[in-house]
Amino acid sequence: MNKLWMLATLVPAVALGQEAPKLTDAQLMATPECHCQTQCEAMWAAAPDAIEDASSMRVRMASDTMIDTYVPRTVGYLHGRAIKTPSGSGGYAFVATFDSRPELPDLYATATNIFNIKMNAAGGGGCK
């Protein structure tokens, strides 16, 4: 069974079960944003695992503003990229993009949701 398919069914339950303030499904799947330094650091620290889990590929490069996975050579795996960009709130937004050959748009949506859920769960403690 494809690792990404298994994650798509398991990650939402895992993310919801963490010890953090309960977030609605819409909040969990929204584009992740942070609003203070500690929250931003925690969320960016979680980004490599989130992009690996969402794409089923290992991280090949990470910087302060971008994380990139290896490009897959097998159908069913995705190339993933996470970008940290300044948001209007004074914090950052974390945006993941995915691609593959052949194109798999339904899988991109699932991978994006997995990334967003994991990132929002990592930042669920908010700012104190």
Image (spheres, rainbow, N blue to C red):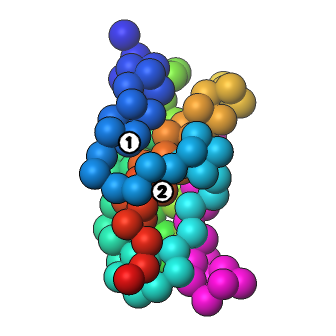
Magenta-colored stretch includes residue 95: yes
- Amino acid type shown at disc 1: Ala
User: Magenta segment range?
Assistant: 85-100
Disc 1: CA contacts within 10 A as few (<14), some (14-19) or many (>=20)? many
Q: CA distance from mark 2 to mark 1?
A: 9 Å
Please tell me how many numbered marks the rendered image carries: 2
**Residue named by callout 1:** 15
In the visual, does 84 lie left or right of 108? left
Residue at 39%, 20% (x, y): give it: 6
- Amino acid type shown at disc 2: Asn
Seen from the viewer's position, the closer of residues 7 and 76 is 7
Query: From this viewpoint, is residue 119 visible?
Result: no
Whether the residues at callouts 2 and 1 have beta carbons within 8 Å, the answer is: yes
Residue lying furthest top in this view? 1
State the image coordinates of residue 120 (x, y, percent, origin top left): 48, 56
Magenta-colored stretch includes residue 4: no
106 in relation to 92, above or below: above
Name the chief secondary structure element in magenta. Answer: strand
State the image coordinates of residue 109 (x, y, percent, origin top left): 65, 35
Secondary structure type for disc 1: helix
Residue at 37%, 10% (x, y): give it: 1
Seen from the viewer's position, the closer of residues 76 and 95 is 95
Secondary structure type for disc 2: helix
| Image-quadrant location for residue 57 | top left
98 in relation to 60, above or below: above
Which label number is shown at residue 120?
2
7 in relation to 20, above or below: above
State the image coordinates of residue 14 (x, y, percent, origin top left): 33, 35
44 in relation to 101, above or below: below
- Locate the C terminus by quadrant: bottom left
State the image coordinates of residue 25 (x, y, percent, origin top left): 58, 40
Residue at 38%, 42% (x, y): give it: 15
